[in-house]
Image: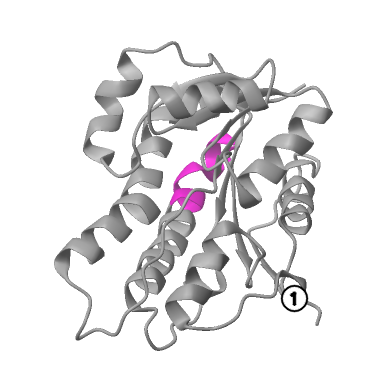
Amino acid sequence: MGTHVITGAGSGIGAAIAERLSERGDELWLLARDAGRARELAGRFPGARTLVGDLAEPERLSWALSHQELPQEVDSLLHVAGVVDLGTVDELTPKVWNATLAVNLVAPAELTRLLLPQLRLARGHVVFVNSGAGLNANPQWGAYAASKHGLKALADALRAEEKGGGVRVTSVYPGRTATPMQVKVHRQEGREYDPGRWITPEAVATTVLTALDLPEDAEITDLRVRPSA
């Protein structure tokens, strides 16, 4: 049985991963932005532990986690939470840029830093659920794509730094996935949303678990997932 810390477990891909891990009896520690959200997650995933920390304020994560019990060892840290706001470069304000980078890049870096001792003890695995935007930037996706390109750089640097200690690092790059975030994206794009056109969160969860369940002598570094339609 593994011990997993998951961000973004409230919906979409994060919820699908948490459900799969819970079903097989693994130990879950779910990060919530506030106490109310933590209670919701605890009710949805019986037996799961919760941690409270706001990814929108990464500079406060160290203080927040220092006042809570943490797992002694972490077999996987799964970065799934993210935010998106579309707009052209001449429309996007510093507020949008800072908010996007905080949640999508700086918070994953800080949370990883804070849990690296537990990951090293377990010879654990860090999984970054990135995006196709982490490989290619399209019009109006500048802030989001920049944050995801940065997340790829973070993963690559971490992998090189930690390979001697047995910590594995995987980046997963899903294409458009049928999640609440995708509903928001379609609304911003002014397009009709048809979830049947996109990858299911469960399919991405299968991809993540495939990376987690590899024998210790193998590592998936980067994995792209695309809708088959």
**Label 1 secondary element:** loop
Judge by depth and name the residue closer to the eye, 82 or 108: 82
Question: Which amino acid type is marked by label 1?
Answer: Pro
Residue 214: % across, % down: 79, 45
What crowding class fits label 1: few (fewer than 14 Cα within 10 Å), some (14-19), or many (20 or more)? some
The magenta span reads: 158-167
Residue closest to the far right: 24
Where is 117 relative to 183, above or below? above
Judge by depth and name the residue closer to the eye, 153 or 186: 186
Residue 210: % across, % down: 79, 49
Q: Point out the image quarter for the N terminus.
A: top right
Which residue matches tag 1? 227
Residue 105: % across, % down: 36, 54
Horizontal arrangement in the rendering, residue 197 relative to residue 160 (left or right): right
Q: Does residue 133 appear anywhere in the picture?
A: no
Image point 75% across, 28% down: which residue?
A: 22
Image point 35% across, 44% down: which residue?
A: 107
- In reply to whether residue 159 is colored magenta, the answer given is yes
> What main secondary structure does the magenta stretch of the protein show?
helix
Image point 41% across, 73% down: which residue?
A: 145
Occupied quadrant, residue 75: top right
Judge by depth and name the residue closer to the eye, 172 or 24: 24
* Number of numbered markers: 1
Q: Point out the image quarter for the C terminus.
A: bottom right
Horizontal arrangement in the rendering, residue 177 relative to residue 188 (left or right): right
- In reply to whether residue 67 is colored magenta, the answer given is no
Occupied quadrant, residue 27: top right
Q: Does residue 138 appear anywhere in the picture?
A: yes
Image point 73% across, 50% down: which residue?
A: 205
